[in-house]
Image: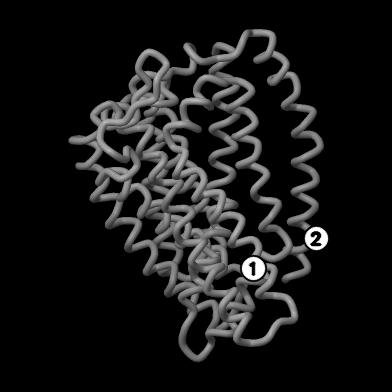
Amino acid sequence: MELEELVAAAGLGCVVLYGVLGGADFGGGIWDLFAGGPRRNEQRAVIARAMGPVWEANHVWLIFVIVLLFSAFPPAFANLSIGLFGVFHFVLVGITLRGAAFVFRGSKVAARQATHWGTLFGVASIFTPVLLGMAIGAISSGNLRVIEGQVQSEGPTPWFTPLALVIGGLALALCAYLAAVYLTNESAGELQEDFRGHALLAGTFVVGLAIVVLPLCYFEAPHLWNGLLSTRAAPVLVVGLLSALLSGWALLRRQFRLARIATIGQVACLLLGWGLAQYPYLIYPDVTLQATAAPAPTLRFILYSLPAGAALLVPSLWLLFRVFKSAAH
């Protein structure tokens, strides 16, 4: 592999980690907003207890992807920042609002204020993953163009096409599914059954939207369609499909730990498959890894720095999850 491919692989790995960890945090906000029934308050308490100690730490993967992008592929970072300016700023607003709302909702405020903050927390948790999915749709479909160094769009908003909207909905459903499956492992008794029901509902939406997105890829993003069927990406997606089937079966049989493992595999393979299908483009069809890569010394420095950073980050995160998740059980 070339230097830029190694750096891009590290970035894709962090996208996967953000998907399976940060995505579950967004999903927790979704289920907090839609908590209902006689155990509504208990559901919200489980969600707060599950994500409270670790949710901010999960954003480290998104920060890493951003730093890696502007360090290793600066022209691509500039093009994305211009072309998706509105989307990215609304994503930033969503992440900021949900963080503030989660903190204020848990502080000592009046019940009415807590309800308002909780609503804001849930709403921000909904539109943020949708916007991230729409951004993926925009850079994969060819509606965002970079011609002679100038960012242009095919149509008024490249992220507001049918494909981008459906991918945004799929991202939302996946986040909700991840969170519900994780929460079945954080609860017991009737609450566990509540979250099992949430997971089965979200899983149904995931399947439905996945069926819709495939023909849209064929008609609106033939490059992505062909990439998904390539020998590079297809085996990964097959593993993801088998993981999805195993996850659904495990939920039906109430094998919640197996469902969690299979769900992680499902989401990881989906994101890996997308990255492999998109290769070598950062923005299809005009911006490639090779054309926008930083000089070789910069790429080498990034690659040499990764093991040192991982040696500090990974044990710290492992200890964080070990302490608080073990205490929860």
Give the amino acid type for the residue marked by disc 2 in the picture.
Answer: Val
Rendered-image quadrant of the C terminus: bottom right
In-image side of 178 versus 64 (left or right): left
Q: Residue furthest top?
A: 296
Please tell me which residue lies in front, 173 or 180.
173
Q: Residues within 10 Å of mark 2 (few under 14, many from 20)?
A: few
Front-lying residue, 136 or 278:
136
Q: Nearer the viewer, residue 105 or 269?
A: 105
Mark seen at residue 323: 2
Residue at 79% over, 43% down: 315
Which of pointers 1 and 2 lies earlier in the amino acid sequence?
A: 1
Q: Secondary structure at mark 2?
A: helix
Horizontal and vertical percent for residue 115?
A: 57, 81
Is residue 246 visible in the rendered image? The answer is yes
Amino acid bearing label 1? Phe
CA separation in Å, label 1 and label 2: 21 Å
**Image point (31%, 56%), residue name:** 207
